[in-house]
Amino acid sequence: MASLGGNILPFGTGFDLQPMHYAGIAVALLGGACLFSFGKQSNTDGKDPSSPGFFKSFFLFFYSSFLKPHQSGSKASQQDALEGFYKTQAVAYDTTRGILLRGREDMLALVVAQLKAKFQAPKEAGSGKTEKRIWVDIGGGTGWNIEAMGDHVNVPEFFSSVYLVDFSPSLCEVARKRFERLGWKNVTVVCQDARKFRLEDYEDGMPAAQNPLRSPALSYFKQQRPDHGGADLVTMSYSLSMILMKQPDYYSVVDSIGSLLSPSGVFGVVDFYVQNQFDFSFRNYTAGYIDRHVNALSRMFWRAWFDFDRVALESGRRDYLEYKYGTILNLNARNRSLGYIPYYVWVGCQKKPFSKTALPHEILERIDAYATESPYLFPVNQGDALTRAIERSAPEIRSKAFLTAVQNLSANLPLPAFFYQNHHWRIYYDDQLQKHTQFNDEYIYAFTWEDARVDERILKLGPEDKVLAITSAGDNILSYLAQGPARVHAVDLNPTQNHLLELKAAAYTALPYEDFWKIFGEGKHPEFRTLLITKLSPHLSSRAFQYWLKNVNVFQSTTYGLYDTGGSRHAIRAMRWVSRIFGLRKAVKQVLNAKTLNEQREIWRNKIRPALLSKLVSNLVVAQESFLWTALGVPKNQLAMIENDHAESDIVKGPKPTAKNTRSHAIWHYMVNTLDPVAEETHIGADNPYYYVCLAGQFTPKCHLRYLDQEVHAKLSRPGALDGLRIHTDELEEVIARIMPGTLTVAVVMDSMDWFDPGSEAANKQVTKLNRALAIGGRVMLRSSALEPWYLKVFEAHGFTPKCHGGRRDGACIDRVNMYASCWICTKVDNLRPPTPDMEGVGSNEITSLQI
């Protein structure tokens, strides 16, 4: 028996866990759960008329697992021990494991989704070549996994060859009968030690070990297995934890997978586990930590029970798997039907990043260029002169992703999961930093509060533009992409805001318009979890995938939907609370259904305005600083700007003042100047989706944001349409500082400058970095809660010329949101010293690349 490792507490050494007692409880739970669920659940093997009945199956399982002595002795081999455990219960295996082995369906769905995404690219490129697809199922037992894969693909057609490798003759015999019954001729059952299985023994054209020596002893020590094989898919379903009984060494089994898996192949594992957060919290290559930690009581309990049955749950198995291979994505879950047994699903690949068009070091360079707009993105004949010009000004501009990759490679660690994704939209970030965790895994905005139509009219983006903008909910980012710029860098410090943008980008790529509309137009989709796993998962980073898997209720709730979530939900629910208190629910529906603007105005003036804009609501709710921040995202500096403008206004300082210089009066007048023009000048039910979604909780085909247009979906769902998207999870200043000088043409900073302390050095630094990153003529678009924000003078002092494109004076409605007092464009007219490198007139024959 192999050592259990340092994470297992040896029995009988000072702390008795009473494994027999725990095992008895667990067996009782298992039996009760199985009996309860028998009438409700069906499994794939139920199609086989030769399988025994449920009660006989359960008796065989109970006897083999807890009563029948394990075969032992000096002459018993590993296969003998394995067969001694499985032989009695082989025919009943599938019937009794349906409730115990959770996550197998999810693992199969995830890996086949990855395969479909990988094989879709050549198809979209117009290649008519049909490639062989090979699947090796290690520890495949009775073949349940392979038959269950039939729910996702036609196995005989999708895979040219399938190999089930298991060390138990009894289980293999069940598998052979299964595939004879199914008539699947492409499935081969191999009863063999997984470490000795060689794909080249069964498939032509596979890379094989080179062994020129004739001596058996010499050849044994000299023989090297190839670095990779030809299998497009390798899976292990609840077999890694069984290696304690099957094999004396799980390291060699995990190592052997590399010689089976093709360079672009997918490796899927589902298994039990227990682990403490201190084991993994400092690793940057595990692809997210959501629900991975298992509390101390559960760790002790499940280790004791599984150890009684010779199943090892020590964390070293999963740790070694993640060390040996690159992680694409994973999930951590609990078997709620059976005592919350922890299990995980892991999807990975070869540790060395692979692309059919680039070497590994070129992939790193390219991803670095994605984040920094480095010269690597320029044509080959624009190399050295440009590089030298940039190096004179910024000799060490590298993305954080690149620096992290170099650190991992120097330590022989896998790269962060971001490097193994099918799309490089999302740039690496450290999700354990306090600046990210402060948001408590919650986004503030479920939809963006800036009018995309006005942005489009003012900016007029073209194919040469390179845009940097704050993500928010991602709606305007997608509207910018629909205009066809060369690049759009989306920046947000809150990881979940970027998770929302990623989800929208993945939905464009993978879903038809009908599903896309249900998720983001109506804010609900009853099949969201299924779509997430089967369609969206290959197009999401692991952290975004984990987040949405944990929060499927956002879209599958029977009450609230997407637009009733996030921090801004407090404002929406406050509006509903006010409408109930003042009996306005009918009036709100009338506004949404108003046929004309005049009809809307009458309802607003006579029914809604007297209640919503009452001093009572302003004093008790809206003027509270906690509400302004939690519900509307208004920080204290922005609140101070509102109060300052109010204090200087004619209604306070004029010859006939009508308002007091107090916060409640300032907020009340700001609300009036926001809502009155919207209600009087914009038709909410027909052409103001920003307020429609607040009142209705969803959009309509007639009234919705631009990114929800069917024509925009058709455009952005084309292959490569989102290749220009980069998603940065960091401070705006940090991202700007790593952008190559003189490369951006537009920066949309929304109201972020309002957050700075007046006269602060931080504001000076950010404007300086904006000047450095922008080309001459580049524009900074900003909105402010002040009519003339103090930092305009900072822009003027740093080479910009500001121009107002909308001011909320004399009751003006500057856009359909009208939430901000002014909108400005600051155009770069001069470089700061040292000057931004001149990007024109450079040329050479090569680009110097970093060798790793």
Image: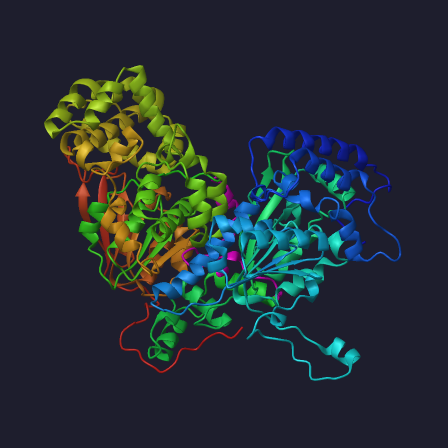
* Residue shown at 57% from the left, 46% from the top: 104
The relative height of residue 46 versus residue 729 in the rendered view (above or below) is: above
The relative height of residue 318 versus residue 415 in the rendered view (above or below) is: above
Residue 525 in view in this figure: yes
Find residue 329 and report its horizontal and vertical position in percent.
52, 52
Q: Report which quarter residue 100 is drawn in.
A: top right
- 281 and 628: which one is in front? 281
Find residue 177 and report its horizontal and vertical position in percent.
62, 52
Residue 2 in view in this figure: no
**Which quadrant is home to the N terminus?**
bottom right
Q: How is the image coloured?
A: rainbow
Q: Is residue 520 magenta?
A: no
Task: Indicate left or right for 603 with 475 as reference.
Answer: left
Principal SS element in the magenta part? loop
- 304 and 723: which one is in front? 304
- 254 and 32: which one is in front? 32
* Residue shown at 12% from the left, 25% from the top: 599
**Which quadrant is home to the C terminus?**
bottom right
Which residues make up the magenta segment?
411-440
Find residue 707 and report its horizontal and vertical position in percent.
27, 47
